[in-house]
Amino acid sequence: MLFKKNISLGKTKLSLTIFLFFIFSSSAYSEQNLEGSSTYIKILDKISSKNILVKLKNGEVKRHKDLLIRSMKCKNSEFDDNPEITAYIQVRDLTNRDKDDVFVFNGWMFSSSPSITPFDHPVYDIWLISCD
């Protein structure tokens, strides 16, 4: 009788351990999938009315004409019904010689509402497209 109690208690502990392992491993896996390694932005030249899709690897600086653009971090939303993409982007204007270290834009961009933190430049517009 004593052996049957110990066996059933061991099975319960094993089942609980396996259940907790799957819960924590799936949440860590989904959290890992939300972060992206590269950001896609669209740059509109207001003078020529042409736009270009640019892929930025996180942490890497890319030059587009008079702009130096860096994506520091990008993240996808957890919900599929209303996708939201956020990215931390820094933009420096190379034509501004007086303030070399000042960014034209330094902050978070949101794909669903670009007007929350607008990128304000007389020649270019930037929109966040996706996070990969």
Image (spheres, rainbow, N blue to C red):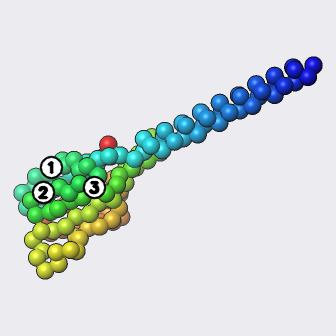
Residue 56: horizontal and vertical position, in percent? 23, 50
Q: Are marks 2 and 1 in contact (CB under 8 Å)?
A: yes
Residue 103: horizontal and vertical position, in percent? 23, 70
Which residue shows up at 6% across the image and 57% down it?
Answer: 48
Which residue shows up at 55% across the image and 37% down it?
Answer: 25
Residue closest to the far left:
48
Q: CA distance from mark 2 to mark 3?
A: 16 Å
The residue that label 2 is drawn on is 64
Residue 52: give its label: 1
- Label 1 SS: strand
Number of the front mark, 2 or 1: 2
Number of the front mark, 2 or 3: 3
Is residue 110 among what the camera can see? Answer: yes
For the C terminus, the image quarter is: top left
Is residue 127 among what the camera can see? Answer: no
The residue that label 3 is drawn on is 59
Front in this rendered view, residue 117 or 39: 39
Which residue shows up at 11% across the image and 76% down it?
Answer: 97
Query: Would you say 74 lies left or right of 20 here?
Result: left
